[in-house]
Amino acid sequence: MSVFETVRELKSFRECRDETIPRKIIGKVLEAGRQGPSPGNVQSIEFVVVEDEDKLDMLSDSVNDGRVEDVPTAVIVIADVERMRRRVGDQCYSFCNAEAAMTVQNMRLTAQEEGISSCWITGFDEDLVADQFEIPGGKTPLGVLIFGYTDNPTESPSRFGLNEICFYDTYGNQVDSVFDGFEWGGLREEREVYGKKVQGLTDKVRRKVRKFL
Protein backbone atom coordinates (compact mmCIF):
# COMPACT_ATOMS: atom_id res chain seq x y z
CA MET A 1 0.00 0.00 0.00
CA SER A 2 1.35 3.41 -0.96
CA VAL A 3 1.68 6.27 1.53
CA PHE A 4 -1.20 8.03 -0.25
CA GLU A 5 -3.42 4.96 0.11
CA THR A 6 -2.51 4.64 3.80
CA VAL A 7 -3.47 8.27 4.37
CA ARG A 8 -6.80 7.68 2.64
CA GLU A 9 -7.44 4.54 4.72
CA LEU A 10 -6.49 6.09 8.07
CA LYS A 11 -9.24 5.20 10.54
CA SER A 12 -10.14 5.77 14.18
CA PHE A 13 -12.50 3.64 16.29
CA ARG A 14 -15.13 3.70 19.02
CA GLU A 15 -14.38 0.21 20.31
CA CYS A 16 -11.62 -2.31 19.78
CA ARG A 17 -10.99 -6.00 20.23
CA ASP A 18 -9.49 -7.41 23.41
CA GLU A 19 -6.24 -8.21 21.65
CA THR A 20 -2.72 -7.28 22.72
CA ILE A 21 -0.52 -5.35 20.34
CA PRO A 22 3.00 -6.86 20.24
CA ARG A 23 5.65 -4.57 21.67
CA LYS A 24 7.70 -5.09 18.54
CA ILE A 25 4.96 -3.35 16.52
CA ILE A 26 4.54 -0.60 19.12
CA GLY A 27 8.31 -0.10 18.95
CA LYS A 28 8.05 0.38 15.19
CA VAL A 29 5.24 2.91 15.70
CA LEU A 30 7.29 4.81 18.29
CA GLU A 31 10.32 4.82 16.01
CA ALA A 32 8.20 6.34 13.25
CA GLY A 33 7.22 9.06 15.69
CA ARG A 34 10.84 9.64 16.70
CA GLN A 35 11.73 10.20 13.05
CA GLY A 36 9.25 13.08 12.69
CA PRO A 37 10.58 16.54 11.81
CA SER A 38 11.56 18.79 14.70
CA PRO A 39 11.77 22.61 14.60
CA GLY A 40 15.42 23.55 15.01
CA ASN A 41 16.16 19.86 15.65
CA VAL A 42 15.25 20.44 19.30
CA GLN A 43 13.64 16.96 19.46
CA SER A 44 11.25 17.94 22.22
CA ILE A 45 8.94 14.92 22.03
CA GLU A 46 8.98 12.07 24.57
CA PHE A 47 6.61 9.16 25.21
CA VAL A 48 5.05 7.26 28.08
CA VAL A 49 3.64 3.93 26.87
CA VAL A 50 0.71 2.78 29.02
CA GLU A 51 -0.24 -0.92 29.06
CA ASP A 52 -1.18 -1.58 32.69
CA GLU A 53 -4.97 -1.95 33.07
CA ASP A 54 -5.18 0.16 36.22
CA LYS A 55 -3.11 2.91 34.60
CA LEU A 56 -5.31 2.79 31.51
CA ASP A 57 -8.42 3.13 33.71
CA MET A 58 -6.87 6.11 35.47
CA LEU A 59 -5.87 7.70 32.17
CA SER A 60 -9.35 7.13 30.80
CA ASP A 61 -10.87 9.09 33.67
CA SER A 62 -8.24 11.83 33.41
CA VAL A 63 -8.82 12.50 29.71
CA ASN A 64 -12.56 11.83 29.96
CA ASP A 65 -12.61 9.27 27.16
CA GLY A 66 -14.06 5.83 27.84
CA ARG A 67 -12.24 4.24 24.90
CA VAL A 68 -8.92 4.49 26.72
CA GLU A 69 -9.79 1.90 29.37
CA ASP A 70 -10.51 -0.73 26.71
CA VAL A 71 -7.42 -0.37 24.51
CA PRO A 72 -4.34 -2.58 24.86
CA THR A 73 -1.93 0.34 24.46
CA ALA A 74 -1.98 4.09 24.92
CA VAL A 75 0.88 6.51 24.39
CA ILE A 76 1.13 9.83 26.20
CA VAL A 77 2.91 12.28 23.90
CA ILE A 78 5.00 14.72 25.94
CA ALA A 79 6.83 17.86 24.90
CA ASP A 80 9.89 19.25 26.66
CA VAL A 81 8.53 22.79 26.51
CA GLU A 82 11.41 24.34 28.43
CA ARG A 83 14.00 22.89 26.07
CA MET A 84 12.03 24.29 23.14
CA ARG A 85 11.70 27.64 24.94
CA ARG A 86 15.47 27.94 25.21
CA ARG A 87 15.68 27.60 21.43
CA VAL A 88 12.69 29.60 20.15
CA GLY A 89 11.51 31.72 23.08
CA ASP A 90 7.86 32.49 23.74
CA GLN A 91 6.67 30.62 20.63
CA CYS A 92 7.68 27.34 22.27
CA TYR A 93 4.14 25.97 22.66
CA SER A 94 3.33 26.53 19.00
CA PHE A 95 6.53 24.77 17.95
CA CYS A 96 5.96 21.90 20.39
CA ASN A 97 2.42 21.39 19.12
CA ALA A 98 3.67 21.39 15.54
CA GLU A 99 6.29 18.78 16.36
CA ALA A 100 3.73 16.68 18.24
CA ALA A 101 1.32 16.80 15.30
CA MET A 102 3.95 15.52 12.88
CA THR A 103 5.03 12.85 15.36
CA VAL A 104 1.46 11.64 15.84
CA GLN A 105 0.74 11.49 12.12
CA ASN A 106 3.84 9.37 11.55
CA MET A 107 2.74 7.02 14.32
CA ARG A 108 -0.84 6.74 13.11
CA LEU A 109 0.19 6.01 9.53
CA THR A 110 2.66 3.33 10.65
CA ALA A 111 0.04 1.73 12.90
CA GLN A 112 -2.49 1.74 10.05
CA GLU A 113 0.05 -0.04 7.87
CA GLU A 114 0.16 -2.75 10.55
CA GLY A 115 -3.62 -3.10 10.59
CA ILE A 116 -4.02 -1.10 13.81
CA SER A 117 -6.50 1.76 14.18
CA SER A 118 -5.76 4.77 16.36
CA CYS A 119 -7.28 7.87 17.95
CA TRP A 120 -5.66 11.16 19.00
CA ILE A 121 -7.05 12.65 22.21
CA THR A 122 -6.39 16.21 23.38
CA GLY A 123 -8.09 18.90 25.47
CA PHE A 124 -7.64 17.27 28.87
CA ASP A 125 -6.19 18.51 32.16
CA GLU A 126 -2.47 18.43 31.34
CA ASP A 127 -1.37 19.07 34.93
CA LEU A 128 -3.47 16.15 36.22
CA VAL A 129 -2.01 13.70 33.71
CA ALA A 130 1.51 15.01 34.35
CA ASP A 131 1.06 14.47 38.08
CA GLN A 132 -0.44 10.97 37.73
CA PHE A 133 2.33 9.73 35.45
CA GLU A 134 5.18 11.50 37.26
CA ILE A 135 6.07 13.72 34.31
CA PRO A 136 8.68 16.23 35.53
CA GLY A 137 8.25 19.99 35.52
CA GLY A 138 8.94 21.82 32.27
CA LYS A 139 7.50 18.90 30.27
CA THR A 140 3.85 18.87 29.17
CA PRO A 141 1.60 16.01 28.00
CA LEU A 142 0.13 17.38 24.76
CA GLY A 143 -2.08 14.42 23.91
CA VAL A 144 -2.83 10.74 24.23
CA LEU A 145 -2.68 8.38 21.27
CA ILE A 146 -4.61 5.12 21.66
CA PHE A 147 -4.20 2.00 19.52
CA GLY A 148 -6.31 -1.07 18.95
CA TYR A 149 -7.44 -3.72 16.52
CA THR A 150 -11.02 -3.02 15.54
CA ASP A 151 -13.71 -4.69 13.46
CA ASN A 152 -15.69 -1.47 13.20
CA PRO A 153 -13.49 1.49 12.23
CA THR A 154 -15.30 4.81 12.13
CA GLU A 155 -16.10 6.27 8.75
CA SER A 156 -13.92 9.17 7.71
CA PRO A 157 -15.80 12.48 8.01
CA SER A 158 -16.63 14.37 4.85
CA ARG A 159 -14.06 16.98 3.91
CA PHE A 160 -13.96 20.11 1.80
CA GLY A 161 -12.98 19.39 -1.77
CA LEU A 162 -9.68 20.60 -3.20
CA ASN A 163 -11.67 22.96 -5.40
CA GLU A 164 -12.79 24.74 -2.22
CA ILE A 165 -9.48 25.05 -0.40
CA CYS A 166 -6.69 25.11 -3.01
CA PHE A 167 -5.67 28.12 -5.09
CA TYR A 168 -2.91 28.83 -7.59
CA ASP A 169 -0.50 31.75 -7.20
CA THR A 170 -3.01 34.01 -5.39
CA TYR A 171 -5.80 33.31 -2.95
CA GLY A 172 -9.09 32.76 -4.74
CA ASN A 173 -7.53 31.77 -8.08
CA GLN A 174 -8.91 28.29 -8.72
CA VAL A 175 -7.74 26.26 -11.71
CA ASP A 176 -9.36 23.17 -13.14
CA SER A 177 -6.70 21.47 -15.23
CA VAL A 178 -6.78 18.28 -17.27
CA PHE A 179 -3.18 17.76 -16.20
CA ASP A 180 -4.05 17.60 -12.49
CA GLY A 181 -5.53 14.09 -12.58
CA PHE A 182 -8.79 12.63 -11.34
CA GLU A 183 -8.34 13.78 -7.74
CA TRP A 184 -8.60 17.44 -8.71
CA GLY A 185 -11.80 19.29 -9.57
CA GLY A 186 -11.67 23.05 -9.87
CA LEU A 187 -14.70 25.27 -10.01
CA ARG A 188 -14.00 26.74 -13.42
CA GLU A 189 -11.62 26.65 -16.34
CA GLU A 190 -9.07 29.41 -16.49
CA ARG A 191 -8.95 30.52 -20.12
CA GLU A 192 -5.52 32.03 -19.76
CA VAL A 193 -4.01 28.78 -18.46
CA TYR A 194 -5.68 26.62 -21.05
CA GLY A 195 -4.88 29.13 -23.77
CA LYS A 196 -1.17 28.92 -23.03
CA LYS A 197 -1.23 25.11 -22.99
CA VAL A 198 -3.19 24.85 -26.22
CA GLN A 199 -0.96 27.44 -27.91
CA GLY A 200 2.11 25.54 -26.80
CA LEU A 201 0.81 22.28 -28.27
CA THR A 202 -0.18 24.04 -31.50
CA ASP A 203 3.27 25.59 -31.92
CA LYS A 204 4.88 22.22 -31.33
CA VAL A 205 2.77 20.59 -34.04
CA ARG A 206 3.51 23.41 -36.49
CA ARG A 207 7.26 23.04 -35.95
CA LYS A 208 7.08 19.32 -36.67
CA VAL A 209 4.99 19.88 -39.80
CA ARG A 210 7.46 22.46 -41.13
CA LYS A 211 10.32 20.04 -40.51
CA PHE A 212 8.86 17.58 -43.00
CA LEU A 213 7.69 20.11 -45.61
Image: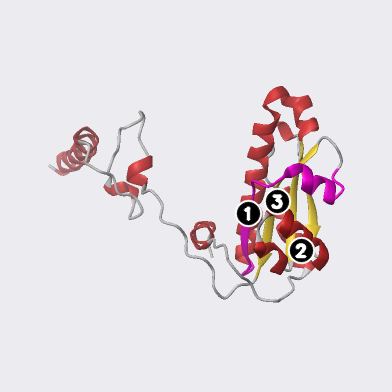
Q: Earlier in the sequence, mark 1 or mark 3?
A: 3
Classify the position of the C terminus by image quarter.
top left
Which dot marks residue 201?
A: none
Q: Nearer the viewer, residue 171 or 62?
A: 62
Q: Check disc 1 and report its element: helix, strand or loop.
A: strand
Whole-percent x and y of residue 113? 61, 65
* The residue positioned farthest toward the left in the image shown: 213
Q: Identify the magenta region.
A: 114-135
Q: Earlier in the sequence, mark 1 or mark 2?
A: 2
Q: Check disc 2 and report its element: helix, strand or loop.
A: helix
Whole-percent x and y of residue 87? 76, 26
**Up-down: is 84 above or below 50?**
above
Mark 3 against mark 2, which lies toward the viewer? 2
Residue drawn at 68 percent across, 60 percent down? 146
**Up-down: is 57 above or below 164?**
below
Q: Mark 2 sits on what residue?
A: 57
Residue 46 visible in image:
no
Q: Give the left or right position of residue 56, taking residue 148 as reference.
A: right
Name the kind of residue labelled 2 in the image: Asp
Q: Mark 3 sits on what residue?
A: 33
Whole-percent x and y of residue 31? 74, 54
Which dot marks residue 120?
A: 1
Residue drawn at 60 percent across, 64 percent down? 112
Residue 155 visible in image:
yes
Marks 1,2: beta carbons within 8 A: no
